[in-house]
Amino acid sequence: MSFGGLLSIARSGLAASQAHIAVTSQNVTNAQTPGFSRQRLQVTQSDPLRVPQGNFGTGVSMRGTMRVRDEVMDDGYRHDSQYAARNEEHRNAMTAIENVLGEPSESGLATSLELFWNSWSDLSVNPESGAARGVVRQRGAQVATQLNTFGNQIVDAQTATRTRMLETADRVNALAGQVAAINARIVAAEAGGKEAPDMRDLRDAHIDELASLVGATAYPQANGSVNVNIGGDSLVDGANFKTVRVQSEISDPTRLGIALGGLSATGGPTETMYQLGGQMAGFVTSYNDTYPDALTRLDGIAAALVTETNAVHGTGFVGSTPANDFFSAAHTTARTIRLDAAIVANVNNIAASGISGEAGDNTIALALSQLRDTKVSVNGGTASISEGYRTVVAHIATATNAANGTATAARTLATQSNTRRESIKGVSIDEEMVNLMKYQQSYAAAARLISVVDEMSQTLINMAR
C-alpha cells in the first residue's frame, strides 16, 4: 500500500473520530431537552483496495447519524399515555361534581333538608305562629337555592368541558398539520438514504401529544413518513392531513362527538366518531354522560321534594281556603326548583292545618315534618328524600374514589412506560463521557498514524539521497 493510501486511511479515521465527538457533544448538550433521542454515528469499513498482493483496507466510511429509539416502546407509551389522560379527565369530572356537593358539611344540602323538616316540626308545635311560618319559608328557599346552585355549577362544569373540547380540537388540528409538514421535510431530507434524527424527534414529540389528546396511533412508512390514525380513520397521511371538529350528534343534538374531515355534500354534519382515546375521549364521556347523570340524580331529588311536599301541603287549609302548592309545580328540576309565588308573597299562605277554619290544627305541618322518614319514589327507588340524597352523595363518592384509583394506576403505567423507553433513547452523561474519551483517543491514534507515515516517508527520502 502507498503512503497516500495510508494517509487516506488516517484521514478517514480523523474525520470519523471528529464526527463521533460532534455527535457525542450533541447528546450531552441535549441531555435535558424534552423529546430528544440520543444519537449514534453510523460507520462502516470502507470498500477494500484489491491489488495483486491482496485486499487492503481503505479506512472507515460514515453513513450518517441515527437515533437510538425503540418504536415498540413508543407505541406502548402512547397507548398507556392516552389511557391515563382519558381516566384523569374522568377523575377530574367526578372530583368537580363531588366538590359541588361538598358533603359531608354542616352547610350542605343534607343539613338544609334536616333544617327544613325541623321547621315544619316547630310549626306543628305552634301552628298559628307567623314567625314559625317565616322559618319554614326560609328553610324551603334555602333548600331550593342550594339545589339551584348545584345544578347550575354542574352545567357550568359541563359547558367548560365543551370549551376545552373545542380548544383541544384546535390543538389536534395544529399538531396534525405540523406532523404532515415534517413528514414532507423528512422524506426530502432522507431521499439520499441518511436519517434526519432531529426532525424525527420533533415529529415524535407531536405524535406523543396527539396520542395523549386524542388516542392517536402512528404507522411508519418506508419513505420515512408516518401515517397517524385516530378513531380508526386516517388523520395524517404523508404530507396530507384532515381536521377534527366538535359537533352535536346527529341522533341526539344534546350530545357532542368528534367528527373527522369536512362537512357532508349537503352541508350537514358527517357521522360522529366514537372510537377515540386520550383526553378528548374523557371530555366526550364527561360531557355526554358524567355530568348529565349527576344532574339527573339531583333532578330526581328536586322532583321528589316538590311532588311530595306539594301533595301534602295541597290538602291543607289557610283559614277556610284550600292551600296552594308550597313549591312551584312547574319547576321540578335542580336548576329551577323554587317556592310557589303565593308562598313568596305571604308566609300566611303556608298551611299547617288540615281542617277548614281550624287555625290551631297542626295536621299538615306534622305530616310534612314526617316526610323526613316517609318512603317515597326517588330516582327509580323507594326511600325518604333525605335518604335519596345521601344515596346520590354515596354514589358520587364511590364513583370518584374508583375514578381516582383508576387514573392513578393508569398514570403509573404511563410513567413506567416512559421510563422504559427513556432507558433506551435517553442520554446518560456518564456513558457519553466515556465515549468522548474513547473518541478522543481514536483521534489521537489517527493523528499518530499520520506522524508515522510522515516519518516513514522522510526515511525513504533520506535513503534516496
Image (cartoon, grey):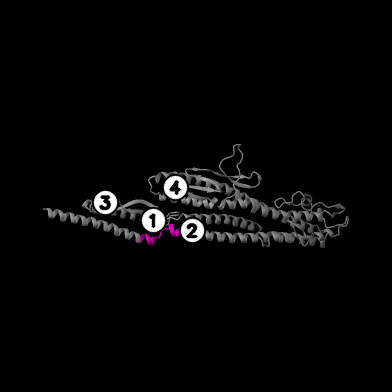
Mark 2 vs 1, N-terminal side: 1
Classify mark 2: residues with Cα within 10 Å, few (<14), some (14-19) or many (20+): some
Separation of disc 2 and disc 3 at Cα? 47 Å
Magenta span includes 408: no
Q: Position of residue 129 (x, y in %)?
A: 81, 59
* Residue 39 seen in the figure: yes
Which of 220 and 300 lies nearest the eye of the viewer?
220
Any mark on residue 222, and which?
4
Mark 3 or mark 1, earlier in chain: 1
Q: Which callout, 3 or 1, points to the residue nearer the camera?
A: 3
Q: Amino acid at mark 3?
A: Leu
Classed neighbour count for the residue bearing mark 4: other residues with Cα under 10 Å, few (<14), some (14–19), many (≥20): few
Instruction: Tell which tag, 4 or 3, sits nearer the viewer.
Output: 3
Q: Earlier in the sequence, mark 2 or mark 3?
A: 3
The residue identified by callout 2 is: 418
Residue at the far left: name it. Answer: 465
Label 2 is placed on what type of residue? Asn
Stretch in magenta = 418-433
Q: Which residue is mark 1?
A: 27
Q: Quadrant of residue 422?
A: bottom left
